[in-house]
Image: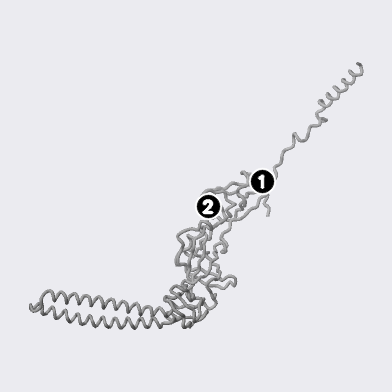
Amino acid sequence: MKVFLKAAAVAVAVVATGCGGGDKAVVPQASTAQVVQKPVGVRAVTPATQLESNLLQATGSVRARQVATLSAQASGTLTSVSVNVGDTVKRGQALARLDTSNARIAANQARASKAAADAALDGATSEVERARVLAQSGSLPRASLDKAEVGHRQAQAQAQQAAAVLDSAQEALRDATLTAPFDGVITTRKLNEGDYVSPGTAVFVLVNTQELEVRAPVPESFVDRVKVGTVVKGTLNPSGAPFEARVRSLGATIDEQTRTVEVLADVLPAKEDGALLRAGALVELDFSNAGAADGAPEQAGLFLPTQAVNARGQQGFVWVVQDGKAQRRDVKVERVLPGFVRVVHGLGPAERVVADASLPLQDGTSLQVVQ
């Protein structure tokens, strides 16, 4: 019992000693240490004062404005084919001919029938004129005059019918010759002499290589800056040879899959150092100056990546890096291209902006800019 009381007294003495000496007391360090916030690592960007020209480019393809598949208009055997692939032809030039034996016979018969009908009409005309004179003097009964009038009308109808048959026969004779509807180059020849054709059988493909156009799908984000009549610069892919084209039309609809609008531009005559374009070639059209006004390019301004701006519509905000801390800045923006917005108000050209506006930052958050 005495041993237990002595041990308890020693324990009380130790505790009392620890509580009494203020300079000797040991206080846990974690209870008094201040928590230091580590800076948030961010990437920062400076607003661009001008968009790169390649952001306003569109890839297009060259095609001929006039392409025709020339087909036979009559039935028969090809007796001559006078052009080959690669030949340049003129409008109205004969390209191929069919056997015209039957067509000539039919035309001659129609011509003879028309001559007979015309002679019969002349005789009926003379007869009715005499009948009218006699009827006026009372020397001819009314019934005889009516009969002469009917004969004259029948002769007129027969003459008209004979003329129509002759026209048809002559048209069939002309259809036996296949001619070029416009100036161009033969790009395809499907048949040869001796082949039998019927109406609709394709014989040639003719392309007008002098009148070319470029079809380019332009992103909807800047197509409204493209105006009809604007001359745009282009380069041939992959040689890079330059050319120019004038915008002729803008598509009325937006492709739901690609979100682009079809733009058609007529290729202008090539200069000495210009590109030799061919239908089917791939080209790049540069629309960077398409919307220029008073010499100021449309792509001038302050531009940021879309990810750097938290915006709905035109109103939004960015995080500006100010003295190593985050500062919220309200801005007004407008979308100009996929992935880019133009800052209309609220930001200076030399300010650094956090590249990702979705980061959970607050005013005063310490930042460490990393590359």
Whole-angstrom CA distance, mark 1 to mark 2, is 26 Å
Q: Secondary structure at mark 2?
A: strand
Q: Is residue 283 left or right of residue 41?
A: left
Image x and y of residue 183, in percent: 45, 78
Residue 126 lies, with reference to residue 6, above or below; the image says: below
Label 1 environment density (alpha carbons within 10 Å; few <14, some 14–19, many ≥20): many
Looking at the image, which is closer to me, 134 or 293?
134
Judging by the rendered image, the residue that carries numbered circle 1 is 366
Circle 1: element type: loop
Q: Quadrant of the C terminus?
A: bottom right
Give the number of the disc on residue 333: 2
Query: Quick check: can you spot residue 122?
Result: yes
Residue at position x 53%, y 52% in the image: 333
* Callout 1 amino acid: Ser
Residue 221 pos. (x, y %) = 51, 57
**Which quadrant of the figure contains the N terminus?**
top right
**Numbered disc total:** 2
**Looking at the rendering, which quadrant does residue 176 occupy?**
bottom left
Q: Which residue appears farthest toward the left when viewing the image? A: 138
- Residue ranking furthest to the top: 1
Q: Which residue is rendered at x = 46% and y = 59% of the image?
A: 253
**Residues packed near mark 2 inside 10 Å, few (<14), some (14 to 19) or many (20 plus):** many
Amino acid type, label 2: Val
* Percent position of residue 111, x then y: 31, 82
In the drawing, does residue 63 fall left or right of residue 29?
left
> Residue 338's spot in the image, x, y percent?
55, 56
